[in-house]
Image: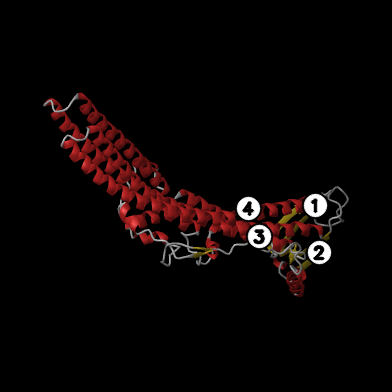
Amino acid sequence: MRASTFTISALLAAMVLSGCASVGPDYQRPVMETTVMWKTAGQQQADFANWWKQFQDPVLDQLIAEAISSNQDLVAATGRMEEARALAVGARANRFPSVDATAGASRSKASETTGRLAAGADPRSKDFQLGLTASYEVDIWGKLSRADEAAKARYLASEANRNTVRTSVLSSVVQTYFSLRAADEQVQLALDTLKSRQTVLALQQKRRAAGAIGDADLHLAESESAGAEVTLAQAKQNQSGLESALAVLLGRSPAAVAQPQIARGKPVQALYSLAGLPADLPSDVLQRRPDLIAAEQNLIAANADIGQAKAQYFPSLRLTASTGYESNVLENLTKPGSLLWNLAGNLVQPVFRAGAIDAVVAGAEARKTTATAQYVQAVQGAFRDVHDALTAVSTNDQVYQASLKRVDALRDSQRIIQRRYEQGYSSYSEVLNAQRDLAQVQTALIEAQRAHLAAVVSLYKAVGGGWDVSAPRA
């Protein structure tokens, strides 16, 4: 029992001594000039974690919840995160002793004709064993602690990558939903235009039969009616494609993707009116972006890999211990006289590896160089995303306001030209040109609303919206 106590004490002492010196560089974040304040037209304090709720659309909220639970990209990212967590647990386990319980029993018979058996000795024998074995690598140079550090950083990177996927999926769902609501408006506009063209065609056919107009005006009406049918068919095709795309994003079954049934909520005009911007944004808000978190954690892991590689230059010390009982009679197995123990240490110093360790260290340093560049690029990309999103929001709002003015002007112009045509002062081609111009601007107005909504979504995505940055990690 004293031997067992001594063995355990020796292992505990080794654990205390381990990790006293970790070779390799300690992590330092790359220095960059990142102090910026972006001016926005918004005044509200945005809820970045649930930014889509500002649109007050229960249907949209339901679609978001469906995507979070069923989107397959998100499911796959969660699987990768769980795998990284398992690897991190395994790396940490290497820093602790491994203890195994052993039990064995054997029965054997020696040859009686070899001369090696003593006279009168029983050739048959039994052996019973019961014990514990323990082994422990003393982490003198921090090899195992650096491996633990790298594995933990890679797990946090995979967790951040999952949040990146979540942010991307949610923004794609919202943008696709907005595009679908805009497509619904385009379909309705095309339907209204077709009905108007068909009404005009019926009127022109009556007028031609009465001899009031010639064949040219009738053919123009027929052409415009057919053109409206083409526009309607194209609008419905776009609408159907958006429905199936949204069904895939929601993670629905193949049958549901083949025949998508997507609920509708607020019209695009109401969504546009609710699209608010957050108040002025400091660059610090980008620290919530999960892709930047992932890039930095990958850099931390690469930095730790250097220390893990350099530790191979130094000696490694492994302690082993065993204690237990052994007897040839089962009844005597646990008696004090059957006690045995063993304690051993093994020190290994690399002497000649033909440059193998140098190559490992060089590879680790090269990976850190790559990870540093990727981190810097990720920060640059984040700043560009915010800049481009703010520019798009401002530009699309200007386009929308100008399109509103054009719609009002063209409506007035169409009424005047229609009146002049009815009085015989304008040709039918002038009426058609005015109708075409109005339809085109109305289409552009709907597209400006969709583009503005998409830009607002891009802004919230650019600042890392869509996940709760304050939530504790698993």
The residue where tag 4 is placed is 374
The residue where tag 3 is placed is 300
Residue 324 on image: x %, y %: 73, 66
The residue where tag 2 is placed is 345
The residue where tag 1 is placed is 358
**Is residue 414 toward the left or the right of residue 447 in the image?**
left
Q: In which quadrant of the rendered view does residue 306 lie?
A: bottom right
Task: Using the image, determine if residue 200 lies above or below residue 329.
Answer: above
Residue 39 on image: x %, y %: 48, 63
C-alpha separation, residue under disc 1 versus residue under disc 2: 27 Å
Q: Is mark 2 on a helix, strand or loop?
A: strand
**Is residue 317 toward the left or the right of residue 222 in the image?**
right
Residue 449 on image: x %, y %: 36, 51
**Is residue 32 toward the left or the right of residue 64 in the image?**
right
C-alpha separation, residue under disc 1 versus residue under disc 4: 24 Å
Q: Do the residues labelled 4 and 3 touch (CB within 8 Å)?
A: no
C-alpha separation, residue under disc 2 versus residue under disc 4: 43 Å
Q: Are marks 3 and 1 in contact (CB under 8 Å)?
A: no
Q: What element carries label 4?
A: helix
C-alpha separation, residue under disc 3 versus residue under disc 2: 33 Å
Q: What's under tag 1, amino acid-wise?
A: Asp
Pointer 2 or 4: first along the chain = 2
